[in-house]
Image (cartoon, rainbow, N blue to C red):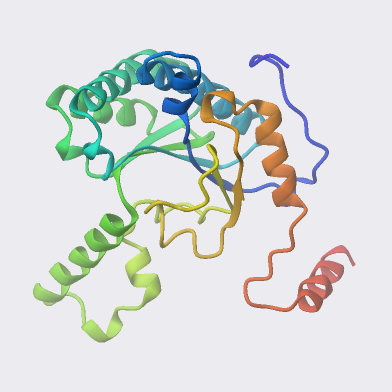
Amino acid sequence: MSANQTFNLNIPREKLPRHVAIIMDGNGRWAEHRNLPRFAGHRAGVETVRSIVQMSGELGIEALTLFAFSSENWRRPKKEVGLLMDLFLSALEREVKKLHETGVRLRIIGDVSAFPKKLQQRIQDSMDKTRDNKGLTLNIAANYGGKWDIAQAARKLAEQVAAGTLNPQDIDESRLAEHLSLSELPEPDLFIRTGGEQRISNFLIWQLAYTELYFTHILWPDFSREEYAKAIQSFASRQRRFGQTGAQILELEQRGHA
């Protein structure tokens, strides 16, 4: 199936995830397996992003969050980091018009203040252009870390306490969650990690508390629409209990169909 064809799944809409989060792992290894520079894998990965964004929109998924650059990725070789910054900038320049035309709302989450000024401006311009779109919300996590996200939320609460506008006794999980990066979206239903690793690597560590996890050995540039469909089908086959028993969930489902 080509990237321009619609992908249909025989899954009831209520069984589809509302929000999918993905760690796009394996670009460098994909290139190395082909005796190519690692950066060639990152370029190939951009093509996969385009395909998965399109399919998510076709399926009516509300939000897609992609881990593009973690706060730990600054430890990579300086040349690779520089090339990644250039790729990020060129991808924004090339893709935002297409995203806007298809109704995608683009958001960049993370500490973007560490990026070059030109990239920061392009990020802001891209978010402003797509701000009012009503289709898929595409979140790109860049210079993002789950611990950073929780810390910055705690800092905002501390500032409110210091200003006398918040009582410490009123701080609870929901109050802190209001200040996290994706506070206005449903928490991820499905987490996918490509490339064979089986950990969440400081990605959305608060938001993934009850998320269904799916790991695959497929490297990100090879993560096709068919592989994405497999992940979604796996999600649809699971019973999500959120602390309840399977019998309770079954009873609720039967009532819903009554």
The residue that appears at 63% across and 77% down in the rendered structure is: 243
Total number of numbered labels? 0
The residue that appears at 40% across and 22% down in the rendered structure is: 42
In the displayed structure image, the side of residue 174 where residue 102 appears, left or right: right
In the displayed structure image, the side of residue 57 where residue 183 appears, left or right: left
Residue 59 visible in the displayed image: no
As rendered, which of 194 and 239 lies closer to the eye?
194
The single residue placed furthest to the bottom in the displayed view is: 169
On screen, residue 165 above or below 118: below
The residue that appears at 59% across and 24% down in the rendered structure is: 222
Q: Position of residue 18 (x, y in %)?
A: 60, 48
Residue 178 visible in the displayed image: yes
Q: Quadrant of residue 172?
A: bottom left
As rendered, which of 101 and 119 lies closer to the eye?
119
The residue that appears at 20% across and 63% down in the rendered structure is: 156
Quadrant containing the C terminus in the rendered view: bottom right
Q: Position of residue 232 (x, y in %)?
A: 69, 43
The single residue placed furthest to the right in the displayed view is: 258
Q: Position of residue 74 (x, y in %)?
A: 22, 38
As rendered, which of 154 and 29 lies closer to the eye?
29
Quadrant containing the N terminus in the rendered view: top right
On screen, residue 142 above or below 130: below
Q: Position of residue 51 (x, y in %)?
A: 57, 22
Q: Quadrant of residue 54?
A: top right
